[in-house]
Image (spheres, grey):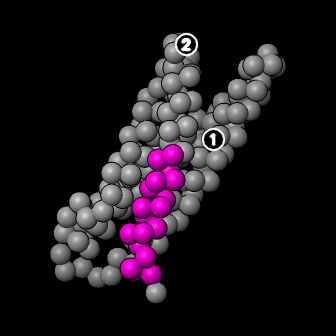
């Protein structure tokens, strides 16, 4: 494609990735607080579950935004998607976030869903590390 520089798109992606990691940390904190209250049989504040769901929804939105930016930017810049392992790391993050969301919707009625949700989010941390590293190596040639 004969398109202008994609540096603006990479900047949006960088900000979205930073925000995604921040939201992930807040999800970890709110989820840990939910676990603490549940394990100590203390009442849960009404806002806590709502906040956790809103943050999870925000993470899903940000990850899908990053996926679309990655596809558009990479196709526009390179003409294909398979030029680095960042694609596979990114698809891993997207898959884990979507799987975690799907399992989270089952927590209320299925006892197996909570530990699966926690394991998926632990794996998501590893996937975020991989996608951050691979993304950093991908954008280095474009930075001034």
Q: Residue at x 60, y 49 (%)?
A: 23
Name the image quarter holding the N terminus.
Answer: bottom left
Q: Residue 90 appears at what percent x and percent y?
A: 38, 52
Q: Quadrant of residue 69?
A: bottom left
Most foreground residue, 121 or 16: 121
Task: Report, in whole angstroms, how far the alpha carbon at label 2 lies from the one at label 1.
Answer: 20 Å
Labels in figure, total: 2
**Residue at point 47%, 26% (across, down):** 103
Which secondary structure, mark 1? Answer: helix
Q: Which residues are magenta?
A: 126-143
Residue at left offset 46%, top offset 54%? 130
Q: Is residue 139 above or below residue 31?
A: below
| Mark 2 neighbour density, 10 Å: few (under 14) some (14–19) many (20 or more) | few
Q: Secondary structure at mark 2?
A: loop
Looking at the image, which is closer to me, 116 or 34? 116
Q: Is residue 24 above or below residue 51?
A: below
Q: Earlier in the sequence, mark 2 or mark 1?
A: 1
Position of residue 81 in the picture relative to residue 38 (left or right):
left
Q: Would you say residue 138 sits in the magenta stretch?
A: yes
- The residue lying at 57 percent from left, 30 percent from top is 118
- Mark 1 surroundings: few (<14), some (14-19) or many (≥20) residues within 10 A: many
Q: Which residue is mark 2?
A: 111
* Disc 1 target residue: 27
Q: Position of residue 105 (x, y in %)?
A: 49, 25
Q: Note whether residue 48 is visible.
A: no
Q: Position of residue 119 (x, y in %)?
A: 53, 30
Relative image position of residue 2 (x, y in whole percent) = 19, 80
The answer to whether residue 138 of the structure is visible from this angle is: yes
**Which numbered circle lies on residue 17?**
none
Magenta stretch encompasses residue 95: no
Residue 29, quarter of the rendered image: top right
Q: Is residue 68 above or below residue 73?
A: above
């Amino acid at each position: 494609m004969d398109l202008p520089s994609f540096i603006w798109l990479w900047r949006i992606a960088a900000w979205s990735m930073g925000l995604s990691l921040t939201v992930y940390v807040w999800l970890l904190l709110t989820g840990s607080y939910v676990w603490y209250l549940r394990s100590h049989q203390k009442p849960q504040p009404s806002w806590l579950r709502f906040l956790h769901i809103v943050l999870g929804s925000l993470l899903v939105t940000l990850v899908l935004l990053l996926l679309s930016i990655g596809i558009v930017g990479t196709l526009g810049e390179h003409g294909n998607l398979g030029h680095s392992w960042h694609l596979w790391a990114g698809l891993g993050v997207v898959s884990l976030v979507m799987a975690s969301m799907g399992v989270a919707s089952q927590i209320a009625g299925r006892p197996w869903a909570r530990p699966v949700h926690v394991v998926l989010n632990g794996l998501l941390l590893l996937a975020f590390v991989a996608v951050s590293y691979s993304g950093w190596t991908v954008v280095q040639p474009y930075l001034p």
